[in-house]
Amino acid sequence: MAIKQLSETLINQIAAGEVIERPASAAKELIENALDAGATRIEIATAGGGKTLLRVTDNGAGMRPEDLELAVKRHCTSKLDDNLFDIRTLGFRGEALPSIGSVSRLSITTRTAGAAEGAVISIAGGRTDPVRPSPANTGTVVEVRDLFFATPARLKFMKSEKAEASAISDVVRRMAIAFPKVRFVLSGSDRTTLEFPATGDDRLARMAQVLGKDFRDNAIEIDAEREDIRLTGFTGVPTYNRGNSLQQYVFVNGRPVQDKQLLSAIRAAYSETIPHGRYPVAVLSITLDPALVDVNVHPAKSDVRFRDPGLIRGLIIGAIRQALAREGDRASTTGASGMMQAFRSGQYRPQQPWSAETSPSRPTHFDTMLRGLSETPQASFAAFSAPSARTASPLPEPERTVAEMPAPQSFPLGAVRAQLHENYIVAQTQDGLVIVDQHAAHERLVFETMRTALHAKPVAAQSLLIPEIVDLSEDDCDRLMTHADELGRLGLGIERFGPGAIAVRETPAMLGEMDAAGLVRQLADEIAEWDTASGLSSRLEYLAATMACHGSVRSGRRMRTEEMNALLRQMEATPGSGQCNHGRPTYIELKLSDIERLFGRS
């Protein structure tokens, strides 16, 4: 067949298939143009989920008539010179407006500051009318009607009006978080209005507007830097989580991105602190030299590629974990809200609490476990031995009455007042009360002790009588041998065995009989994708978590006052004690003001 040149309209329609996938894609491109023009107020109006009408009005710099004519032509832009590796604007490809105009009825009305009058240009299905004068305010109004009318086949792939409107709302939310100094207003055909007033430099206030006021109360600030790459933002405490990842926002040099590698790093940072199927809430901003990141990977510019992805991943995981160790142990404020709701709805039926005075006075297995936790990891492991295998402990001091207990203001988690249902410890704090799940709390304490022991010295290894030979590609073998020392400290001894093969000579003793070949292949795949071999460490920690779960104090166990207070003090001294190994909260805090509201006293 003969080769021929495609028409400009058909070229634009092909480009629109990549750039403008749905109304939300068009909204994103138009909002980015408004932000690049320096707008401080952006209003978005929609009808029919953006398919019937999408109008974006801004108070930016506007365009001159001669610039307006070029703006609707392909690859015409004011944001890019000759250097594709120094991109400092949201848009730069020069494809959005011509792509939108090729599949819809597009009109652009604009005026620059100081101009006597504005100008307007119209495009319908790729056919452009001449620029003509028009009354206009300073800024630009872009109106898109009948999106995809020129390519009706695309309309069949659109979702419902409600779903498309929701996608536009998500775009506006992301942009609002990234630019707190800009006022955003979104109105739809259902007469609802979503408004985000400008908050200036108070980024947390804007996040609270978008994510809800609960996020402000449950957020931890992050500010970390490594090799001239800075990570800032806020992340939620582990007990403040959601059923999906829609409230995870990542920005690279101010650009909202939805990169799977970055979201994976957030998920890895919260491993063992959030239940399976739940997702953390986080807003992170990465700032780095534009030459170190490629934003030209996809026309939609939602994916990015870093020159050193391992460095970025390590920065995110390390910064979040440090923040959680610093402040992540506090209880989520939503837990208290849920408790108050349960009281109001009558779901809670209080029973007679167990009194400390009725507890047995003899020493228990838990005494030894607490002493072990406060001493060394080895001592805490010894605490899991059967009571009959240990020497007798001295009799404890007589229990103190409630009046003799420490003042609640002396400790963050307060002083014990009672135990409910042989599982929940009630403690009084300076300004409220705390309810602790004794099994979940002690499970976390034991796990942290075991994990410390794992990292304090090399993991014990068991030698294989016959080394297991694993066939792999040369590249996978090279990657594994690069991490051989790290794997050796975790009990996995490997070495090269000729071309395309790895010999496994030792495996971690904790794992017992295992599929060594499957583990090595899994590690090879992980290293190839992330340049890290953390899978084995995660497996060992998972085993430690299981052992901690079965070795900790059980529900239904009556505890003495000294035991309960000792548990609270250990929680205060242990990072990560705010949630158990499965991610559930270990305690819930109820402020005195909340209690007073229950009784109508405030």
Image (cartoon, rainbow, N blue to C red):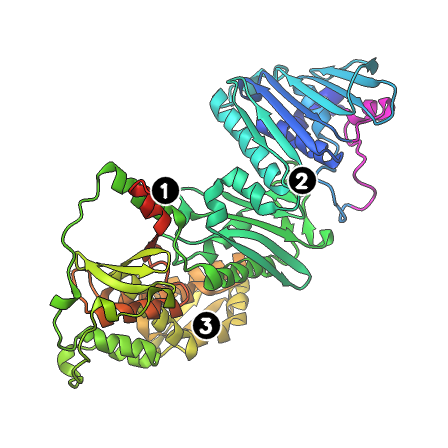
The numbered mark at residue 602 is 1
Of the residues shown, which amino acid type is indicated by label 3?
Leu
Residue under the point 68% across and 19% down: 143
Magenta part of the protein: which range? 61-83
Q: Where is residue 386? Give x, y as percent.
A: 16, 77
Mark 3 vs 2, N-terminal side: 2
CA separation, marks 3 and 2?
48 Å
The numbered mark at residue 253 is none
Residue under the point 83% across and 16% down: 131
Of the residues shown, which amino acid type is indicated by label 2?
Lys
> Can you say whether 213 is above or below 220 in the image?
above
The residue indicated by pointer 2 is 181
Q: Where is residue 242? Give x, y as percent.
A: 41, 44
Mark 2 vs 1, N-terminal side: 2
Q: Where is residue 39? Give x, y as percent.
A: 73, 33
Quarter placement of the N terminus:
top right
CB atoms of marks 1 and 3 within 8 Å: no
Q: Is residue 70 magenta?
A: yes
Which label sits in the foreground, 3 or 2?
A: 2
Residue 149, picture quadrant: top right
Of the residues shown, which amino acid type is indicated by label 1?
Ser
Which label sits in the foreground, 1 or 3?
A: 1
